[in-house]
Amino acid sequence: MAFLSVDFLLLLPFALVLFHAVGGPRGGLRAPLLLAFSVAFHATWSVHYTALLLGTSVATFGIGKRIGSEPQDAGKWRWLMVGLALLLGQLALFKYAPALSTPLASLVAPLGISYTTFKLVSYLVDVYWEKTEPETDVVAFTAYSLFFPQILSGPIQRARDFLPQLKQPASPDVRAERIVSGLRWILFGVFQKFVVADRLAMLVDRVFAAPQEYSNLGILLAVYAFAIQLYSDFSGLTNVAIGLGLLFGISSHANFDAPFSSPNIQEFWRRWHMTLSSWLTDYVFTPLRMSLRNYGDWGLVLAVVANMLAIGIWHGASWTFVAFGLINAMYVSVSALTLKARNRWFKTRPLLARARKLIDPVVTFHMVVAAFAVFRAGSLTDAGYILTHVLPLDFLRAIDSAGFSAAATEALRGMGLGFDKIYLAIPAFLLCETVVHLHRSGALARIAGRTPVAIRWAGYHGLILATLLFGVLEVREFIYAKF
Amino acid sequence: MPSSELPVQRVAGRILLFCAPLLVLGGWLERGLAGVENSYSAKVRGVGAVMKDVEVLVTGGSGALDAIDPSGLSVPAYNLANASQSLHYDCAILSTLIEDTPKLRAVVIGAPLWYLSKELKNSPEAWRQHFYAVFWRVPMEDPPKSFITIQQHSYTALYTPPAAMEYAAAGFPPIDGGLTADGWEPLEVPSPEVAASGLDPIWVRQHVAGHLAAMRTESEVRNLAAVAALSERLNERGVPLYFGWLPVSAGYNAEFGPDARAHQRQMMERLKADSGVRLFDYSTDPRFSDSDFYNADHMNRVGAQKLTAVLRDEVLAPVLSPPVLSPPVLSPAPPTPALE
Amino acid sequence: MMPTAVLEKLTAVFRDVFDDDALLIVAATTASDIDDWDSLAHVNLVVAVEKAFGLSFTTKEISSLNNVGEFVNLIHRKMPPSRA
């Protein structure tokens, strides 16, 4: 069952009523209920893999207790290594074995194995670092590990953040507030996914499947569209996940923080897929950087390369993902190493410094768009073709000779798309970003507080209707224009 | 629930209140859409009205929908064909009608060249399957993967919300697009430009390529079985089943190619040998020229009436004329009918 | 070294790493309070502190720090007792 499916939508109210009716007054039942829901959710995809994930979680639970009870650091370290070998080995097996060896080519990864693995690894390392006590309640722990809202696309929540919320029931007031807040997150995420992301997908999928068949203008538009599509899709899904968590009383960290307005590439990676970035920073980058700290700048570069490569290949075993990681490693290393020098240069030029504030996000955005184009391309050759064919010189020449509207009409016809299907995504995207920025600055809460309920509700109704009207809920092609 | 749960209960109440206007809107849409006549509901109603008297049932895809005019068959007849229909749905629909059509004397499947390799689920118009499930109440080619198939429980989902709201705005008009009372969809004789583009070699190549790409071997297995089963049921009632190719343009034939054609022919011969299906073939008949077509694989009104007459006189004559035991009829190459 | 002296010396290190002579830190200061204090700068900071105080930290010790005050306590704990 997927989140954004009718089946899930119909079962959700029952699960919610059960959870709050039974688990509200009897707080001790919340963990078993959430575990039951999560197991049931998983089982609709595969019963075997559900059992596997449950087994892995219980094993991790046991290892966590061992790490805690070992008196010496050597013993703790050994158990940590056992746990990491189990978790990372399993992840590597499912993600990379099919690509590297033919006997296992048909192996399909269990749903959510990446996110579960990350959560469990973070738990074990945190226990070793004594940032969290080993959990003693196996039901609560497995509920954390298999928590169904976070299984498909995160956010990656740390055990020390999740478990206290699960075990100390929030007051009914807080829970009620979270339900309303959760619904808002879900509505926003659904709008982002269906109206912006899935609409842009129609253009992006076509062009990236066969870039050689499209004009430079088409490629340029598809490249921009992909960055927006990826953001809206991912952000939408994690917003729905966060909202679902809130419905069940669990508050989790946001995953995106208006990344496209980041002033530099390091900041971008701190605002994009934030729970993954912070996981990598805490468990990969910082430990690696610490052990390489006496190698100066080379230590930094190596740690950055390892971090970014991890981000790249986490998506799968493909050269475009590796290239994506390396490109970003280059971006971040160069930016980090030259940041101090650049800041000093601008300090003595206040006028340019002000211009810099406006230009920096634009430059960063384009760096990101270029890297994402490589990420999305079907192969390295395609990626090369795409990056070398983004200047729509032919289109500009056509404007010169035939005027803008004639050139534009011809270009759209050449792309074989009803552009009217795509352009709706742009105002929708701008609306979403406006909301995001208002939310960041706190203005949204203030405005909402001053708006009467009826108007707010009308706004939500409008969003729902807009999603139904403009959302790509079902892709239908027509050969015969009739029903 | 203990009174301390009041805030949560209040939120639940507010959620219900919030949903109320949406439910009212949804209810109004559903009621309005339920009354909309589309080509599927029109045919269900149309054939239902003539079930007791109908003697010939015609079915197939859009080719048959446009090419066969039941009123030209000289006996009560109905055209059950529809756009992008596949053999699975032809046989499923006919199965629901066999018991209740006492006067049935022949069933004709007017097929495009690739019909035996086609299933609707492999077509871009696969969503039409929901219409068969809702209006004809027949099972889909494959059982649905989800527990609830929303398109089969909500008209708004069936037509998709944007289309649904469009119809609502237009006052829920009928959308069955120009069907006659006996299920024929005549296409007007096109203007020279439209005619030219419908026969344009580049368009024809793309069109045929689309058909070739949607053909599947596993579909052939299922289609042959379905037709064989249908033929058996009809034979029990002494009703012959005719399966054959409708006229297509020379360009279409050329693009389809002799190998694909031979393979299809081979399957048809098996149907004839194993299940007594009677075959016909007008795909290369010289009597049909460019002026009879709307585009490469659809006939216009004039061509349709011509074809219907040919079917009546050559294919169905033995069955429709006073009972005479005559062998099956196959495609004549010269103008005079030749019996095989 | 007394904690207040540690804080003073630490402030000097911070000012050097973040290139800001007016920077002030207190026990409650965290990474979010200083603009350029990210994971990249964090390790540079650790290296600079190690050099200034002649100490060596483990990743475990570093990752358990939540603010400057805890950093000061960590330094104070690890410093040999004879230093004044």
Image (tube, rainbow, N blue to C red):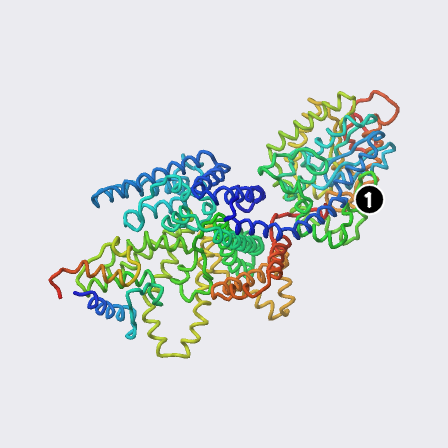
Q: Is residue A338 above or below residue B108?
A: below
Residue farthest to the front, as pictured: B3
The quadrant holding residue A302 is bottom left
Most foreground residue, A233 or A379: A233
Horizontal relation, residue A112 to residue B300: left or right: left
Question: Which residue is more in the foreground, A418 or A152?
Answer: A152
Q: What is the quadrant of residue B122 in the picture? A: top right
Q: Is residue A286 above or below residue A72?
A: below
Residue drawn at (34%, 68%) of the image: A339
* Chain holding disc 1: B
Residue flagged by tag 1: what amino acid is it? Answer: Arg
Disc 1: which residue: B301
Q: Secondary structure at mark 1?
A: helix
Answer yes or no: is residue C73 visible. yes
Instruction: Report the label total.
Output: 1
Residue placed furthest toward the left: C82
> As displayed, is residue A144 above or below residue A47?
below
Looking at the rendering, in which quadrant would you find the C terminus of chain A?
Answer: top right
Q: Nearer the viewer, residue B114 or B253?
A: B114
Residue A64, position as x, y percentages in the image: 31, 42
Q: As displayed, is residue C26 above or below residue A466?
A: below
Q: Residue A239 placed where, x, y %?
A: 50, 53
x then y, percent, for residue B40: 74, 40
Q: Quadrant of residue B140?
A: top right
Q: Position of residue B311 (x, y in %)?
A: 81, 33
How busy is the neighbourhood of tag 1: few (under 14 within 10 Å), some, or many (20 plus)? many
On the question of residue A237 being in view, the answer is no
